[in-house]
Amino acid sequence: MDIYNTSNGIKIFGKSLMLSYRKFKKKKRPLIIAEIGNNHEGKFSVAKKLIDLAAEAGVDAVKFQTFRTKKFVIDKEKKRFNKFQKFELRYSDFEKLSIYAKKKKLLFISTPFDLESAVFLNKIVDCFKISSGDNNFFELIQKVLSFNKPVIISLGLLTFSEIVKLEKFVKKQKNKDVYFLHCITSYPAEDTEIDLKTIEYLKKRIKLKIGYSDHSLGPDAAILAATLGAEIIEKHFTISKNFSSFRDHKLSADLDEMKIIVKFIKRMNKLKGKNKNKLTKNEKKNYESARRSIYANKDLKKNYIIRHDDLVCLRPFKGSNPIDKINLIGRKLKMNLKKGSVVKINNVK
């Protein structure tokens, strides 16, 4: 049961993701989430196409946003209300998208923006996500935690003292699979405010798994976050940055950018290694040709006292170490040595 099995894809979905995430905790590579959000703009066919592209990019999961607009935005805010109502997908659409994502061997995650949607999503998601806007909406957080599925919470808009308060609240619940994501609630987030060092700080101070939700332009911040120890990388995802005037498309990764992120993160752990501090297999192969040994620079007779100019350190390595040259100088040879012979410590008295 391994969500990173590249030959067979993700083997477990829905009811068993808790086990899958326990496996994930033992992995070194971050979980990569393509945040589709509302980039489908209310069109089921676009949402399905985004799942196709996410699978092609090689991510581990897709994430949507699920809401009933009337339970999410006050109707007096006409412009905002109408925009979200336009983006609203039906529950039956999400059921189909969940099934489709699983066929594509992707985890299906969604952010509920109201309690009713949270209850609905429990039937179809592998994991819940709480947005930065709702990380102080403890009623909603408690609801999703009660389902005993993994829960990811973005930390945008919170001060550190508020993050500590959130951590204490979360730990009072029975759900132990909770992840906090460093996040800057700005669209797009500017380089000067992203502050990825926060990931390292949170990992030291917060006793939960820490990841990163990226709102910046380009793939760089997501890649750097992975090197700083983020255990989840969430990046907005779109068909095209010019898909429409909707804000999120510009800051989202397209297929090419997401492929760059995925490729790096999947290679990253090989590059980081395990700090074994010993020669690799290929270093051993190259050792003789790359190292030097001590050779006689001329014919040398038995009982001859070796001088500095009598020895030369050249490739390849043949059993004597250049470090020993200083220990050979001034000592008598036990035998005759021809020019080009390897000179070793056991050749002298």
Image: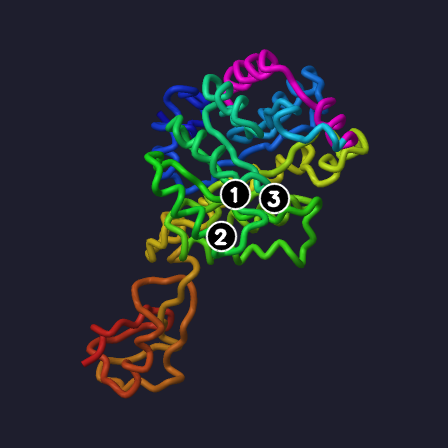
Color theme of the render: rainbow
Instruction: Return the disc, 3 or 2, that comes first in the chain's sequence.
Output: 2
Span colored in magenta: 78-106
Label 2 element class: helix
Instruction: Give the residue type at disc 3.
Output: Asp
Where does the C terminus fall, quadrant-wise?
bottom left
Instruction: Give the residue type at disc 2.
Output: Glu
Instruction: Give the residue type at disc 1.
Output: Asn
Q: Which residue is identified by label 3? A: 214
Q: Is residue 130 visible?
A: yes
Q: Which residue is identified by label 2? A: 162
* Contact check, label 2 and label 1, Cβ < 8 Å: yes
Q: Which residue is identified by label 1? A: 136
* Dominant SS type (magenta): helix
Which of discs 1 and 3 lies nearer the camera? The answer is 1
* Residue 217 picture location, percent across and down: 70, 45
Give the CA separation, mark 1 to mark 3: 20 Å
**Residue at 36%, 48% in the rendered image:** 281
Q: Is residue 266 visible?
A: no
Q: Nearer the viewer, residue 331 or 1?
A: 1
